[in-house]
Amino acid sequence: MVISVIFVSYNTAKMSIEAISSLLASKGDFELEVFVVDNASKDDSVSVIKGAFPQITLIENSVNVGFGRANNQVLDLITGEYILLLNTDAFVQPDTVAKTIQHIESQPSCGVLGVRLIGRDNEQQPSCRYFPTAFNLFAHRLGLGRWLPTLQMVDDSDWNPAITANCDWVPGCYYLVRKQVVDKVGLFDPRYFLYSEEVDHCFAVKKAGWQVVYFADTSVVHIGGESAKSDGKVTNSGKQLSVLQAESELLYFRKNHGLFSCVLNIVLVMLADLIQMIKDLMKLKWKKNSHFFAASKLILISAIKTRMGSTPAR
């Protein structure tokens, strides 16, 4: 069986070597065709990867085209029955490839599969997730999840990482998908530069009748945020570039839930900012450099750039 593996490289030369090496060490009896798409790295990623792995296919972009578009570049070249998207800061265990292929082969309805993600400190990372809505994001921003036990949050507090389960979406750092699924629904929507592309893809996969599965019986060590750190300020919660996250959020809501959902999200972001400011003032937590309404400014700017989520900003 041939498995087509795609890495997108961006300023992560050292980690790319470690990630590709761990993958090749776990190949078992499978044939792997490995592709690396370099998104115009400013470090020595291209020369380092070429020198270490002359047998893989390396595509060199002259500009950074974004995560989803870079993965899509490989689709006409692959020959595998399965496509594995793997981040350059994600390191598989010796049994990861074999176990995930065995499970997806045994579950014909499984279209996309993800695994348990842990940090280098062994800390569990969100790996089995649910679709965002304007209201569950609002509840998350204000920490209301504990007061709304029936509300399904993006990261469900009752999720058990030791149990394999169906979910809405899995993170793209280890993303195993059937070629049959890609042939029917495509891979990533090129409108997303970074973030939400796997959420959007899983939404399409489930809409087409396949299941998205979190597989608990193997793990991947995921660092997170390494490429993002080279391009801008990384947020403290989740290590995500806030500008790109806001733009992708609007694109996702407008595409999959319509204009009303997009507008509702903007309104609730602003309301959350207002409530948080009032709480801080009442508790005397404000400081001279407090950034009141920072999220509101960001979402409004993103709304203008994306024309209310109808077009990509970059």
Image (spheres, rainbow, N blue to C red):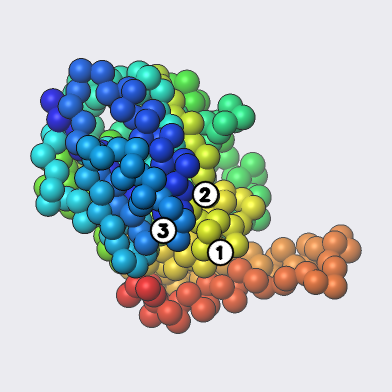
Residue 34 falls left or right of residue 41: left
Which residue has dot 1 on it? Answer: 232
Q: Quadrant of residue 110?
A: top left
Disc 2 residue type?
A: Glu
Q: Residues within 10 Å of mark 3 (few under 14, many from 20)?
A: many
Which residue has dot 3 on it? Answer: 41
The C terminus, quarter of image: bottom left
Distance (Cα) linking label 2 and label 1? 11 Å
Q: Secondary structure at mark 3?
A: loop
Distance (Cα) linking label 1 and label 3? 15 Å
199 to 105, vertically: above or below: below
Q: Earlier in the sequence, mark 2 or mark 1?
A: 2
Q: Residues within 10 Å of mark 2 (few under 14, many from 20)?
A: some
Is residue 141 visible in the rendered structure shown here?
Answer: yes
For this rendering, which residue is in front, 80 or 288? Answer: 80
Residue 210 falls left or right of residue 249: left
Which residue has dot 2 on it? Answer: 226
Whole-percent x and y of residue 216? 41, 23
Residue 289 falls left or right of residue 262: right
Q: Secondary structure at mark 1?
A: loop
18 to 191, vertically: above or below: above
Disc 3 residue type?
A: Ser
Q: Residue at x 13, y 34 (%)?
A: 81
Q: Secondary structure at mark 2?
A: helix
Whole-percent x and y of residue 309? 38, 72
The N terminus, quarter of image: top left
Residue 176 falls left or right of residue 47: left
